[in-house]
Image (cartoon, rainbow, N blue to C red):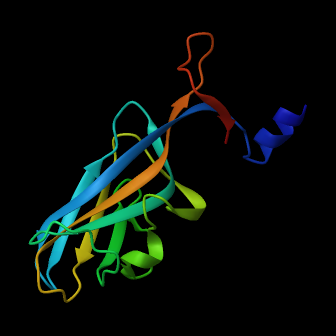
């Protein structure tokens, strides 16, 4: 009876299997104050839920990681056509380090076989830098017992 009531309200819960996975966007050799675009394709076998994000930036001249960067970033979910932010955000406001990633207040689900585009504008450093944004999360598979994929069972 509860399931029928939930269905009537449009709130049918389904079971899915979630397995940890990470995608990354990389912008290589971005000059001072230059704009660059990177794109990733979500694999066709599952949707992807972004749970947290981390970044690294490397000074290409010295090979030394940069801890404070002035770059801004806009992410666009091509599956829905929506920007993730109202305007480009400073990298340091939306992504933490590998040791302490930024946890999203609400997970973002990207549909299978869709694209995510990242538009970056570099800060005013003097060297070309390589930026990497790592999206930590979970591949989300439909649950189909008894031959479902191993992983944590979740309800959405």
Q: How many marks?
A: 0
User: Quick check: 137 above or below 61?
Assistant: above
Which residue of the protein is positioned furthest toward the bottom in this rendering? 124
Query: How far from the left and from the top, in percent, is residue 147?
Result: 56, 11
Query: How far from the left and from the top, in percent, is residue 17?
Result: 58, 30
Image quarter hosting the N terminus? top right
Query: How far from the left and from the top, in percent, is residue 149?
Result: 53, 20
Residue at horizontal 26%, vertical 68%?
65
Task: Judge by depth and name the residue closer to the eye, 55 or 80.
Answer: 55
Query: How far from the left and from the top, in percent, is residue 141?
Result: 52, 30
Task: Judge by depth and name the residue closer to the eye, 152 or 42.
Answer: 152
The picture quadrant where one finds residue 26 is bottom left
Task: Judge by depth and name the residue closer to the eye, 28 or 107.
Answer: 28
The picture quadrant where one finds residue 88 is bottom left
The picture quadrant where one finds residue 58 is bottom left
User: Quick check: 5 above or below 59?
Assistant: above
Residue at horizontal 40%, vertical 40%?
112
Residue at horizontal 56%, vertical 62%?
103
Residue at horizontal 41%, vertical 77%?
92
């Amino acid at each position: 009876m509860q399931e029928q009531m939930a269905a009537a309200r449009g709130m049918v819960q389904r079971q899915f299997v979630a397995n940890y996975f990470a995608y990354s966007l990389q912008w290589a050799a971005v000059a001072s104050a230059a704009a660059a675009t990177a794109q990733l394709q979500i694999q066709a076998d599952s949707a992807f839920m972004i749970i947290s994000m981390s970044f690294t930036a490397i000074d290409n001249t010295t090979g030394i990681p940069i801890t404070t960067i002035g770059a801004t970033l806009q992410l666009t979910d091509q599956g829905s056509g929506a920007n993730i932010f109202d305007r480009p955000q400073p990298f340091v406001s939306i992504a933490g380090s590998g040791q302490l990633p930024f946890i999203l207040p609400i997970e973002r689900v990207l549909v299978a076989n869709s694209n995510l585009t990242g538009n970056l504008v570099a800060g005013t450093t003097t060297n070309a830098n390589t930026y990497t944004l790592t999206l930590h999360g979970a591949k989300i598979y439909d649950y189909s017992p008894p031959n479902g994929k191993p992983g944590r069972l979740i309800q959405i």
